[in-house]
Every structure is written in structure tokens, then in C-alpha cells.
Image: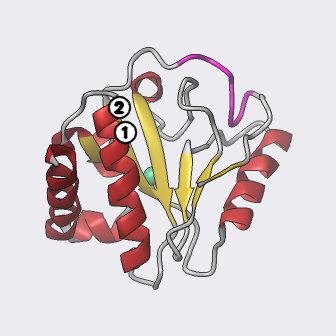
Amino acid sequence: MKTDYLNINEMTRTGEKIKKVENIILHSIGNMYSTLEICKKEMDNLMNQSDVYFSLHYVIDKEGNILNCIPEEEISLSCRKIDTNYYAVSIGCIPCDESGKFSKKTIDSLVMLASNLCIKYNLEAKNVLRHYDITLKRCPLYYVDNSVMFEEIRKRIKIDISK
Ligand SMILES: [Zn+2]
């Protein structure tokens, strides 16, 4: 796991504290050609404008590498439903193909990270949600269209938590 925090600013990292972690929210970020560096740079670039706010605590690439962009104690701006952000840790995965599917290595890292967060914050696998479950935004796209595949990820998290 690498750490490369965003600078404090209004559009990506406000520095406000999380109230209580109640959910882990899953997103997809970028496209199959994205890298951790590109995703970080895209978030960095949002600092210089005033229309779009967006950020994630964690980004996972196709190789399963994890980048931590915001300390867990602070809010990320991953959802338009702003209140949600005070109660969630956000994870964005880079898809491995045009369908928006995540690679096996990405899912392995996601399961590991989400399980650790569930244990740390005393959550259950059902507290791992898709962005879609909060705002109906079709994100992460493949896992909105294929809910069964999302349930598979949740099942693995549930098993990991119980170990
Ligand atoms: Zn999203």
C-alpha cells in the first residue's frame, strides 16, 4: 500500500473529520488504461477548478496495488449525497476492460482492504455498498449491471471477516 495524500482544498480534501465510519463505498474510477498516478493526478487537477468535487480514500489498480489518497479520519468527497461522506470510507477500482469489470488482482486487494476496514470499524459485509446503492448513480457500472458479481465480492468479504 502506497500513501500519497491530496493537498487540503475545497474540491477534494476538505480536511473535515469523519463522524463515524458506517459504510464502505465502492466506485469505479477511470478506464482500463488508467493508473494510480493518472487517478491521483486527475484528483489533484480538481483543486484548480470550482465545479466538480470528487475524491476517494483509496484507489486500486489492475495489478492490485493500493493508493491511499486521504487519511481515513477525514472525509472523502465520493458521493453527491454529501452527508454520506461523513460516514464512509471510499474505495475506487480501476476497471480492466470496457465492461467495467475489475481484474482478479483488483478484487483480491479490494476484498483484503474492505475486510480489514470492516474489522477495524466493526462493520459487516452488508455495510460494503456500491455508489449506486446510495445515489442510484450507475457506479461501479459492471457491478450495477451484474449485481450477482457484487454479491460474490461481498461473500468473500464476509468469509474474510469471520476468519
Ligand atoms: Zn462512484
Residue name at image x 36 percent, y 78 percent: 104
Disc 2 secondary structure class: helix
The one of 112 and 78 positioned closer to us in this rendering: 112
The one of 129 and 155 positioned closer to us in this rendering: 155
State the image coordinates of residue 49 (x, y, percent, origin top left). Answer: 81, 41
Disc 1 secondary structure class: helix
Q: Residues within 10 Å of mark 2 (few under 14, many from 20)?
A: few
Q: Are marks 2 and 1 in contact (CB under 8 Å)?
A: yes
Residue name at image x 36 percent, y 68 percent: 107
* Whether the residue under disc 2 has CB within 8 Å of ligand 1: no
Residue stretch in magenta: 10-17
Relative to 80, residue 160 above or below: below
For mark 1, what is the residue?
117
Q: Is residue 58 magenta?
A: no
Question: How many numbered discs sit on the rendered protein?
Answer: 2
Relative to 63, residue 155 above or below: above
**Residue 101 in sight here:** no
Residue name at image x 39 percent, y 24 percent: 87
Residue 99 falls in image quadrant? bottom left
User: Is 47 left, or right, of 89 in this rendering?
Assistant: right
Residue name at image x 40 percent, y 51 percent: 113
Quadrant that contains the N terminus: bottom right
For mark 2, what is the residue?
120
State the image coordinates of residue 9 (x, y, percent, origin top left). Answer: 78, 29
State the image coordinates of residue 22 (x, y, percent, origin top left). Answer: 31, 26
Tell me how far mark 2 sits from mark 1, CA to CA: 5 Å
Query: Which secondary structure dominates the residues rendered in magenta?
Result: loop
In the image, what residue type sits under mark 2? Lys
Q: Which mark is residue 65?
A: none
